[in-house]
Amino acid sequence: MTAAYSKQDIIAELTAPIADIVKCYPTQRSAIMPALYLAQDTYGFLDETAYRAIAEILDIPEIWVFELASFYTLYKNKKIGKYNLQLCTNVPCMLRGAYDLLGHLQTRLGINKGDTSTDGLFTLTTVECIGSCDLAPAMMVNETYHTNLSKERVDKLLDQLSQSSIKPSVEESKSSVEKSKPSVEKNNASTDKGPSTGTESSAGNGP
Ligand code: FES
């Protein structure tokens, strides 16, 4: 993002929608996380330029933004694939075969954990509990939950995602920014409605 967007670009683009976000919270600081998420949704990932821009928009110390963005794994500090595969490997999912699925995904995609496939479609990561322990093993693809996974279901899901053009790529998202500024409503409704494997949901079911 640094090469394509300057701090001033981001400020010009996001000041208005972040001002709308701030109205929902008691303090400027409370709006850091949704502001970060909006920036990531707009540009595909976050970097120091974005952190500094958000701090300036919110008129808060930069360290407040840096410490939050570096703590939570949902904030990406590098460009990722169109589909972010976030496989849970905590104990309930581990006991239900999560590491077998991880090995299968790595073999199928030809990448290691943390990498992005050469076609730019898939980034593979492992995450802590995503709140679907009762339906383990579970994985999120962008913001959609896929549960009760097996190697066969993973293969079916990857096949469907590979063939799908429902969700725009990062590059397509960047292009759309040029045409219309993001709104808070758009951000709140930006859940991925990717292909169905018959085991997906948009919210987790806690333990
Ligand atoms: S341990 Fe995997 S969803 Fe809770």
Image (cartoon, grey):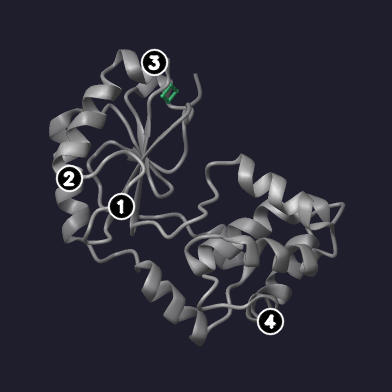
Q: CA distance from mark 3 to mark 4?
A: 45 Å
Which residue is at 80% across, 64% downward?
58
Determine whether the residue tagged by mark 4 lies in a helix, strand or loop: helix
State the image quarter where residue 87 is shown: top left
Q: Quick check: marks 1 and 3 in contact, CB under 8 Å?
A: no
The CB of the residue at mark 3 lies under 8 Å from ligand 1: yes
Which residue is at 29% across, 64% downward?
166
The CB of the residue at mark 1 lies under 8 Å from ligand 1: no
Q: Which residue is mark 3?
A: 92
Q: CA distance from mark 3 to mark 2?
A: 26 Å
Q: Which residue is mark 1?
A: 116
**Residue furthest bottom as drawn:** 179
At label 2, the amino acid type is Gly
Q: Quick check: marks 1 and 2 in contact, CB under 8 Å?
A: no
Q: Which residue is mark 2?
A: 110
The CB of the residue at mark 2 lies under 8 Å from ligand 1: no
Q: Which residue is mark 4?
A: 12
Determine whether the residue tagged by mark 1 lies in a helix, strand or loop: loop
* For marks 4 and 2 on the same chain, the one whose residue lies earlier in the sequence: 4
Q: Residues within 10 Å of mark 3 (few under 14, many from 20)?
A: some
At label 3, the amino acid type is Pro
Q: Residues within 10 Å of mark 1 (few under 14, many from 20)?
A: many
Q: As drawn, is 128 to the left or to the right of 104?
A: right
At label 1, the amino acid type is Thr
At label 4, the amino acid type is Ala
* For marks 1 and 4 on the same chain, the one whose residue lies earlier in the sequence: 4
Q: Closer to the camera, 155 or 54?
A: 54
Q: CA distance from mark 1 to mark 4?
A: 31 Å
Question: Is 179 located above or below residue 140 in the figure?
Answer: below
